[in-house]
């Protein structure tokens, strides 16, 4: 808001200020003095001197060319000098922490007048608190880091620590015992996978895909093996340090030699003759948060299979940044391990039993990705619905074109289907032990992730067509669409490639086919 005193002004008075050097406009019942700004206006001077704009109500023109956020920037907000006598702003913009009123912009369970069998009062309380926290604390940081490429600041990590957010992001379990979660929004014993789904989805309502991974994505996928398979006291030490935001961890499985094909890893760990330590040699690629991690959960080839170790940053461990198509805020890195000595106590799970550790961990990672993929798709649906409604072509709103409505129909159907399937799988997770989830849900989660990422890419294409040229610029009306279209392939590759996961789903189904079944 402008800091100076705003006064009431009549439309007649505004009309008198319609020349270069003396130029006012009305935008949504607010009066802006553009006299000095006009020469600096990124859209040029001439458009502001148009007789339909200068001294006139330029609301329609403004909103067809700018996002509302332009008016919120302090440098532009201070151009406001008053409001139109007896009028109130009509433009309905999402306020911090609020639910969107745009149809399909929120999942059904958050939409007024609709019902869900899964979400209870504590879910609603957590969602409310989380949205407010995200909008006020995380969103400004996400926007800045996505742009400048810096990793998340310690100050914001510390705010997450105060709420015990890091622990919640690892799902329900003993690690939540005795904690006050999100200032008491949910009790530790009530916390279930739907609460975790909410956290993941609330964090995915932005166009900051690189930051989102940098927002301790490494912890979400790298710490569970320590928590579930680590040995005391090392386990308590590392979990304590990471939960308290003092140290960072990442999951280092994929290599230039092997991605989804984990059995083909080349990084080796050789046991010493006295059996006290392993020596690790090899490389890892595409590791999220690697550049700023203090610990790495590393998959290695051992004499009779794979073994997972937690490796501290130290002698022989080097990381370098990899340039990707999203922001360096993710800390994506290449890691080299040269004769790194690791005590046997750092082994996570059984020697040569690492495949089980890695595969069981994949389930949670992939499910987290489904949560965020489904929610970001929804954000794109909201953007497209708003744009198609406000944009005029050939004198009529874009939404009046059947081809646009057809695209929106497909987009809405996709997002609603993946959200419903996601909620079903989340319900299964709530009712299964970690072991049962590994046995029964690897296939369904693989298929769901394939469906989420395929539909996400179709939605990115449709949204690009709906926004036209604006979808290929990084600023302005279509900036979220440009970002989405550029970064959407990440989800279809990280955590297992789309085709591999589809195949996994079918192979798991084949395994469960009853013997002797015939048509
Ligand atoms: C308070 C008043 C205004 C401010 C602060 C403002 C600011 C801006 C900014 C920052 C941009 C760069 C694009 C973006 O970031 O969205 C822009 C572009 C533009 N503005 Fe304005 N503007 C104002 C009023 C207007 C009005 C009344 C018109 C009337 C036609 C207009 C026409 C344009 C055009 C044509 C562009 C280029 C759009 C594009 O590249 O797609 N602006 N303006």
Image (cartoon, rainbow, N blue to C red):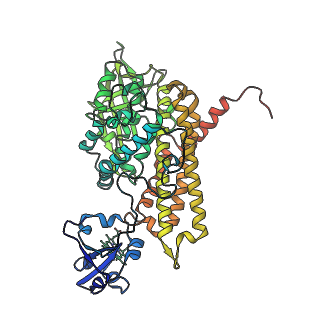
Q: Is residue 493 left or right of residue 127?
A: right
Q: Is residue 496 left or right of residue 176?
A: right
414 or 224, which lies in front? 414
Q: Provide residue 490's location: percent of width, then percent of height.
A: 46, 48
The answer to whether one can see residue 246 in this image is: yes
Q: Provide residue 38's location: percent of width, then percent of height.
A: 27, 79
Where does the N terminus fall, quadrant-wise?
A: bottom left
State the image quarter where residue 483 is shown.
bottom left
Q: Provide residue 378's location: percent of width, then percent of height.
A: 49, 53
Please name the residue shown 46% across and 45% down the image.
372
Please name the residue shown 32% across and 34% down the image.
164
State the image quarter where residue 199 is shown.
top left
* In the rendered image, the vertical position of residue 70 relative to residue 143, given as above or below: below
* In the rendered image, the vertical position of residue 332 relative to residue 169, given as above or below: below
List the single residue furthest toward the right.
519
Please name the residue shown 32% across and 66% down the image.
70
Please name the residue shown 28% across and 29% down the image.
241
Where does the C terminus fall, quadrant-wise?
A: top right
Q: Is residue 118 left or right of residue 270?
A: right
The answer to whether one can see residue 339 in this image is: no
List the single residue furthest toward the front.
86
**Count of numbered labels shown in the rendering:** 0
Q: Is residue 308 left or right of residue 11?
A: right
Q: Quadrant of ligand 1?
A: bottom left
* In the rendered image, the vertical position of residue 319 relative to residue 231, given as above or below: below
List the single residue furthest toward the top.
274
State the image quarter where residue 160 is shown.
top left
Q: Provide residue 257's location: percent of width, then percent of height.
A: 46, 38
């Amino acid at each position: 808001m402008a800091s100076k005193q705003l006064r009431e002004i009549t439309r007649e008075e505004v009309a008198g200020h319609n020349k270069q050097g003396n130029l006012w406009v009305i935008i949504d019942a607010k009066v802006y003095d553009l006299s000095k700004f006009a020469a600096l206006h990124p859209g040029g001077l001439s458009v502001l001197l148009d007789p339909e704009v200068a001294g006139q109500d330029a609301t329609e023109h403004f909103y067809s060319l700018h996002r509302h956020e332009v008016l919120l920037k302090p440098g532009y907000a201070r151009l406001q000098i008053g409001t139109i006598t007896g009028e109130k702003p009509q433009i309905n913009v999402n306020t911090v922490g609020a639910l969107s009123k745009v149809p399909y912009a929120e999942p059904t369970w958050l939409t007024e007048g609709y019902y869900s069998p899964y979400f209870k009062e504590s879910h609603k309380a957590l969602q409310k608190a989380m949205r407010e926290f995200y909008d006020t604390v995380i969103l400004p940081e996400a926007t800045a880091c996505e742009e400048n490429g810096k990793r998340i600041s310690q100050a914001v990590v510390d705010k997450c620590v105060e709420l015990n957010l890091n622990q919640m992001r690892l799902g329900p379990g003993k690690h939540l015992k005795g904690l006050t979660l999100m200032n008491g929004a949910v009790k530790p014993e009530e916390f279930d996978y739907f609460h975790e789904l909410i956290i993941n989805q609330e964090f995915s309502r932005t166009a900051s895909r690189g930051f989102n991974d940098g927002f301790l994505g490494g912890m979400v996928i790298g710490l569970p093996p320590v928590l579930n398979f680590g040995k005391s006291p090392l386990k308590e030490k590392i979990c304590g340090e990471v939960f308290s935001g003092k140290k960072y961890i990442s999951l280092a499985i994929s290599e230039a030699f092997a991605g989804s094909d984990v059995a083909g890893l080349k990084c080796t760990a050789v046991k010493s003759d006295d059996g006290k330590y392993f020596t690790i040699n090899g490389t890892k690629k595409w590791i999220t948060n690697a550049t700023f991690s203090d610990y790495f959960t590393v998959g290695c080839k051992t004499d009779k299979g794979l073994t997972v170790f937690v490796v501290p940053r130290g002698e022989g461990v080097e990381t370098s940044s990899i340039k990707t198509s999203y922001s360096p805020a993710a800390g994506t890195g290449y890691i080299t391990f040269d004769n790194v000595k690791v005590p046997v106590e750092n082994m996570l799970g059984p020697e040569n039993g690492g495949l089980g550790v890695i595969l069981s961990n994949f389930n949670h990672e992939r499910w987290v990705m489904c949560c965020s993929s489904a929610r970001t798709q929804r954000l794109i649906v909201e953007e497209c619905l708003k744009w198609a409604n406000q944009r005029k072509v050939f004198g009529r709103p874009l939404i009046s074109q059947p081809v646009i409505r057809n695209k929106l129909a497909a987009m809405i159907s996709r997002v609603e289907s993946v959200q419903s399937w996601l909620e079903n799988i989340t319900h299964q997770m709530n009712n299964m032990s970690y072991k049962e989830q590994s046995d029964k849900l690897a296939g369904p989660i693989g298929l769901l992730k394939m469906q989420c990422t395929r539909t996400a890419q179709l939605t990115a294409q449709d949204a690009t067509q709906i926004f036209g040229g604006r979808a290929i610029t990084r600023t302005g009306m279509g900036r979220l669409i440009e970002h989405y279209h550029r970064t959407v392939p990440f989800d279809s590759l990280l955590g297992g490639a789309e085709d591999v996961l589809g195949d996994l789903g079918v192979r798991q189904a084949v395994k469960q086919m009853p013997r002797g079944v015939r048509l």
